[in-house]
Image (tube, rainbow, N blue to C red):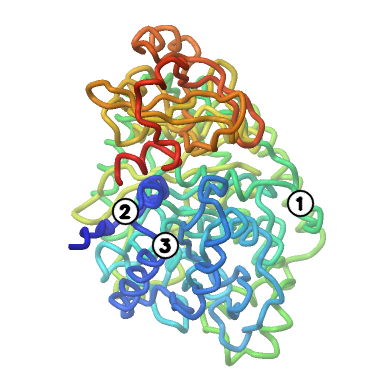
Amino acid sequence: MEAARTELPAKLSAGWLRGQYLSGALDPEEVIREIIRRAARDQGMNIWIEPPSEAHIRPYLEALRELDPLQYPLWGIPFAVKDNIDVGGLSTTAACPAYAYQPEADAAVVARLIAAGAIPVGKSNLDQFATGLVGVRSPYGETHNALRPEYISGGSSSGSAVAVARGQAVFSLGTDTAGSGRVPAALNGLVGYKPSLGAWTVRGVVPACASLDCVTVFAHNLEDALAVDRVARGLDAADPWSRAVKRRAARLPQRLLLPDAPLEFYGPHADEYRRAWERAEAAVLASGLAAERVDCALFFEAASILYDGPWVAERWAALGEFVENHREAVLPVTERILSSGAAERHTAASLFRAMHRLQRYKGEAAKLLEDAVLVLPTCGGTWTREQLALNPVSANSDMGRYTNHCNLLDLSAVAIPAGEAAEKLPFGITLFALADSEHLLAGAAARLLGETVLPQTADGEPAPGWTVLAVCGLHMRGFPLERQMLEHGASFWQEARTAPCYELIKLRSEPAKPGLIRQAAGGSSIELELWLMPSESLGAFAALIPAPLGLGRVELEDGRKVTGFICEGYAGAEAENITAYGGWRYAVNR
């Protein structure tokens, strides 16, 4: 009888899925079939413009057959793409059918993710031309909230967020000019990571405000978001907006900053949101990090520049010609917003006055945020879609009250869940840091979420004070001695293989455990896991290892030499040789 296959959870994560792939419990074909089924189940929620389909996804599945899962960090991980970001073979509409075009190639960030083994499953719905923070401004239908469908989903990256929240992708790409990579995260209970301007290339993205646009990621946890960031980040010489912004190893900031004055909340759940913010503040104060109350006026004043100032003219510069020639194809609310950029008050002089004012705010923010992270609500309320229809423009403006300042001030940000405002109405907070301080966001967000963030630098190398430890048996994920790794502060890092000069034996011990023995000639490549352990813990950990096992130097397939489990050669005489299985997981699952 064939063994039962693993059932996919409602919420998908990259770490869990990779573990299932490597153990043989799941394969990408099964995952894609379930994603297609879920997309069909939720068709009425208007999540997709181009929904997941076997025909589109098949070439990516076939390509995976040629890739070693151990060498590709996102192998088989499905993701959604906001439909203002190009994916080869699929139309880009920006939620305007008359605007649709067939891109010649993937957007640069999409290409990087595919090269790492990820699978783009479809194009997600959005507020037309990425103009809105509510998720209802699309001719393809109003995207429903993932938890309470009668409520707004948040925009403009509405479908991207809901696709992840409904288990139709592990992560998704959005864009963020005024808060579109953060507001939908808050309203659907997700992490929304907005890197510094230029850190992720925007080549192949339909511009909203090109000088402020960012590509962002939605995920269920911080580590998945950062795993995507490690692949997506990097200078793109073909993108004039790209810049080299390195993210250093995660670290806690010296201070968390909270507003020193009461905040304003809005909508029918204003009181519940206020209480949720009070609980979030209490959690910040109890986090063990130094917290300080500060005057946040400069952030709110900077926010007002975005839509009350001349930056709306940048939207008109990008899309004005199309709107003038296709007014009937543009939603009335979108047309009014875009056309406001053509107002006579937006002169060159008004632009320079706003730029000079903003530069002053940037200087003040740089001083305030030195080795610090600012904490604000992601949004201060929400509405049902029916309620929002009665006051669409004002409500949309309210949704950006605590988000609009971010890109104008050249800040990085991460939106994280912070409980609920009411039943099935998630509440979220956003952490803000300077452009060169994303490592502080990672450290602070991990502390507040109770997650572990891998201690590695932006180029993927272990941070100082940490040791790479190769394990090949009972200390691997899911095996009985994994707890010893965790007790000594270690975190799983990546899969790897040894150089082809080792044998793997099964020791006669209780419980049975493997031994890795280097050969003077011959041998094979054996599957390993690489963990990061605090260097100060290594001695105490080594004292727990019984003979004939011990720690030594292990050579990896790519030539690196790391600390790892080795076995004394004499043990092989009385042990079963299990080299042919290629790794302990396969030997025990035979």
Q: Judge whether 541 appears above or below 230 on screen.
A: above
Nearer the observer, 438 or 533: 533
Task: Please give the name of the residue rendered at 59% of the width and 18% of the height, measured from the top-left corner.
Answer: 464
Amino acid type, mark 3: Pro
Q: Judge whether 189 appears above or below 145 on screen.
A: above
Q: Judge whether 112 appears above or below 518 on screen.
A: below
Tell me where residue 489 appears, x and y as whole percent: 39, 20
Tell me where residue 17 appears, x and y as whole percent: 38, 51
Q: Judge whether 394 appears above or below 476 on screen.
A: below
Amino acid type, mark 2: Ala
Residue 390 visible in rendering:
no
Amino acid type, mark 1: Arg
Nearer the observer, 205 or 582: 582
Task: Please give the name of the residue rendered at 33% of the width and 71% of the height, measured from the top-left corner.
Answer: 144
Element class at badge 1? helix
The numbered mark, 3 or 1, whose residue comes first in the sequence reads 3
Task: Please give the name of the residue rendered at 64% of the width and 27% of the height, measured from the top-left corner.
Answer: 367
Tell me where residue 568 appears, x and y as whole percent: 46, 15
CB atoms at circles 3 and 1 under 8 Å apart?
Answer: no
Element class at badge 2? loop
- Say which residue label 2 marks: 25
- Say which residue label 3 marks: 28
Q: Which quadrant of the view contains residue 446?
A: top left
Left or right, 360 with reference to 116: right
Task: Please give the name of the residue rendered at 26% of the width and 28% of the height, measured from the top-left corner.
Answer: 480
The residues bearing labels 3 and 2 have C-alpha atoms spaced at a distance of 11 Å
Disc 2 packing (10 Å; few <14; some 14–19; many ≥20): some
Left or right, 388 with reference to 432: left
Nearer the observer, 248 or 371: 248
- Say which residue label 1 marks: 353
The residues bearing labels 3 and 1 have C-alpha atoms spaced at a distance of 54 Å
Element class at badge 3? helix
